[in-house]
Image (tube, grey):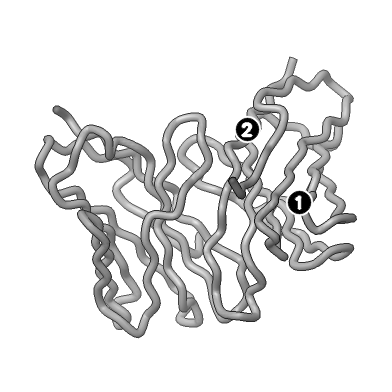
C-alpha cells in the first residue's frame, strides 16, 4: 500500500540536543511538507519542498532544518535553537501543483517531548 | 495573520443530528478548499474538497457549502454518528501553488 511513514512515533529530546524526524513516502509525490500541530492552533507550516534538492521556509522555520536529497525522503531536524519543541509533527506529500491544486496526504505523526 | 478562520472550536451533537463547521478566508486568490478529518494520534485524512466554481459538493453524509461572495465555506455532516467524533480542519490554497493554509480545527463529539 502506498503511503507516508513517519518515525519514530514518539521522541524525547534533551536540552541542547538536535533530533531528526524521519518522513518517507512511496506515493511518487513531488512535493513534501512538514507541519507542527499544537493544541487549539491547527497546523503550522515549517518547511516545504516542491522538488528534490530544493526547499522553502514556511511560517515557523526558525529552529528547524530540512534536506531533500531523494524524492521519497524529507527528514526534519529540530535543533537546540528551537526552544519550545514539544508538539505533534506531521509530514505530508502531494503531487506536483503544476497540474492544478492537489490534496495533501499525511503521515501519522511524531510526538516530540522535552526530557 | 490567520489566513483561514474556523469556528466553532468545539461542537457537541446528538447522534442523528447535523454538525455544521464554518470557515472564512480573506485571500480571493484561494481556489481550492479541502476539509480534513483527524482522529487522536493520527494524521489528518482528506474528507472532501471543493473549488469555487461550484456552490455545493456532496459526498455521502458530508456536504461542503461554498459562498464565494461572502468568502465563507462550511462542512455539514448529516445524520452524525459517534464514529464521526474527531477533529475537523478546513484549509485553502491557491493557483497551482500547493501551499495550504489551515484553520485552527473543530473538535466534534457526537453523543450516542
Q: Position of residue A1 (x, y in %)?
A: 59, 45
Answer above or below: position of B22 versus A41. Answer: below
- Residue B40 in which image quadrant: top left
Left or right relative to A61: residue B94:
left
Mark nearer the N terminus (1 vs 2): 1
- Residue B69 in which image quadrant: bottom left
Badge 1, how many Cα within 10 Å: few under 14, some, many 20+? some
Gap in Å between the C-alphas at discs 1 and 2? 14 Å
Q: Residue at x 21, y 52 (%)?
A: B77
Which chain is disc 1 placed on?
A
Q: Position of residue A29 (x, y in %)?
A: 68, 62
Answer above or below: position of B55 versus B5. Answer: below
- Residue B74 in which image quadrant: bottom left
* Residue A82, numbered circle: none
Q: Quadrant of the C terminus of chain A?
A: top right
* Residue A87, numbered circle: 2
Report the number of discs: 2
Q: Secondary structure at mark 2?
A: strand
Q: Residue at x 19, y 38 (%)?
A: B81
Q: Are marks 1 and 2 in one subunit?
A: yes
Left or right relative to A28: residue B48:
left
Q: Which residue is mark 1?
A: A61
Which chain is disc 2 placed on?
A
Badge 2, how many Cα within 10 Å: few under 14, some, many 20+? some
Amino acid at each position: 500500500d502506498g503511503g507516508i511513514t513517519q518515525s519514530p512515533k514518539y521522541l524525547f529530546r534533551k536540552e541542547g540536543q538536535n533530533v531528526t524526524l524521519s518522513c518517507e513516502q512511496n506515493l511518487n509525490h513531488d512535493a513534501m511538507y512538514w507541519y507542527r500541530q499544537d493544541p487549539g492552533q491547527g497546523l503550522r507550516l515549517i518547511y516545504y519542498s516542491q522538488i528534490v534538492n530544493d526547499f522553502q521556509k514556511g511560517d515557523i522555520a526558525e529552529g528547524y532544518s530540512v534536506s531533500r536529497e531523494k524524492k521519497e525522503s524529507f527528514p526534519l531536524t529540530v535543533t537546540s535553537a528551537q526552544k519550545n519543541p514539544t508538539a505533534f509533527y506531521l509530514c505530508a506529500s502531494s503531487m506536483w501543483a503544476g497540474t492544478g491544486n492537489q490534496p495533501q496526504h499525511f503521515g501519522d505523526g511524531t510526538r516530540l517531548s522535552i526530557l | 495573520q490567520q489566513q483561514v478562520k474556523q469556528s466553532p472550536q468545539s461542537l457537541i451533537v446528538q447522534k442523528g443530528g447535523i454538525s455544521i463547521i464554518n470557515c472564512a478566508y480573506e485571500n480571493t486568490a484561494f481556489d481550492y478548499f479541502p476539509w480534513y478529518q483527524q482522529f487522536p494520534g493520527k494524521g489528518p485524512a482528506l474528507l472532501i474538497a471543493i473549488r469555487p466554481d461550484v456552490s455545493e459538493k456532496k459526498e455521502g453524509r458530508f456536504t461542503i457549502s461554498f459562498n464565494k461572495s461572502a468568502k465563507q465555506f462550511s462542512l455539514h455532516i448529516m445524520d452524525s454518528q459517534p464514529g464521526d467524533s474527531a477533529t475537523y480542519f478546513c484549509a485553502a490554497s491557491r493557483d497551482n501553488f500547493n501551499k495550504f493554509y489551515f484553520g485552527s480545527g473543530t473538535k466534534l463529539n457526537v453523543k450516542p
